Image: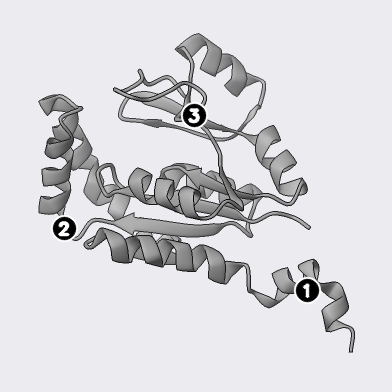
Amino acid sequence: MKGGLFIVSAPSGAGKSTLTAKLLEEDKNIHLSVSYTTRAPRGGEIDGRDYHFIDRAGFQGMLERGEFLESAEVHGNHYGTSEAWIRAQRAAGHDILLEIDWQGAQQVRRLFPDAIGIFILPPSIAELERRMRGRGQDSEEVVRRRLAVAADEMSHAAEFEYVIINNDFEEARRDLIAVVRASRLVYSHQLERFPDLFKF
């Protein structure tokens, strides 16, 4: 049975990482795809768990060898997803979660049209700015740049099957878990899992 593929996207500061961490904690049947990035690690981030941190030359080499399912430049840093790992995990029947931006989501959908897209929205731009500043991880210049592109990122929400507004974290958490669980109950998936039950 082929595993499912879930894409979660959001503008920076919308709460995507916290929500997906809760999903992975509560649903052991879904596995996170760890992206490669040229971005420097932030406080508390661990190589191989949060990202595969790689220099620009290494990233370019992987890109030229066609090893990425998708790749994008975001805020001056490069990100990419290993295609071989995704295909192997799905073939083994594992559900996979991708935390990528809308550009990456478009690339993934071209190869995997059955991927399920989930977009996380903040309740407002003002709240998004408050969250960014509250993290205290980014410089003023970085915050301003992220806010400048947030509206454009949010305009791509219509490209996703599901949109979750992260106003109340607990409600957003329940919504994300509900989307993943409901997707497994689609007729075609159930038929693949339990073919004998449908032999009438």
In this view, which residue lies farthest toward the bottom?
200
- Which quarter of the figure is the C terminus placed in? bottom right
Q: How far apart are marks 2 and 1 (CA)?
A: 41 Å
Residue pointed to by mark 1: 191
Q: Residue 8 at what x, y percent from top left?
A: 44, 51
Mark 1: amino acid = Leu
Judge depth for marks 3 and 1 and give the one in front. Answer: 3
| Image position of 198 (left or right of 18) | right
- Please indicate whether residue 180 sits to the left or right of residue 82 in the image: left
Q: Mark 3 and mark 2 in contact? Answer it, CB < 8 Å.
A: no
- Image quadrant assignment for residue 41: top left
| Mark drawn on residue 49 | 3
Residue 186 sits in quarter: bottom right
Of the residues tagged 2 and 1, which is closer to the observer?
1
CA–CA distance in space, label 3 to label 2? 30 Å
Mark 1 falls on what kind of element? Answer: helix
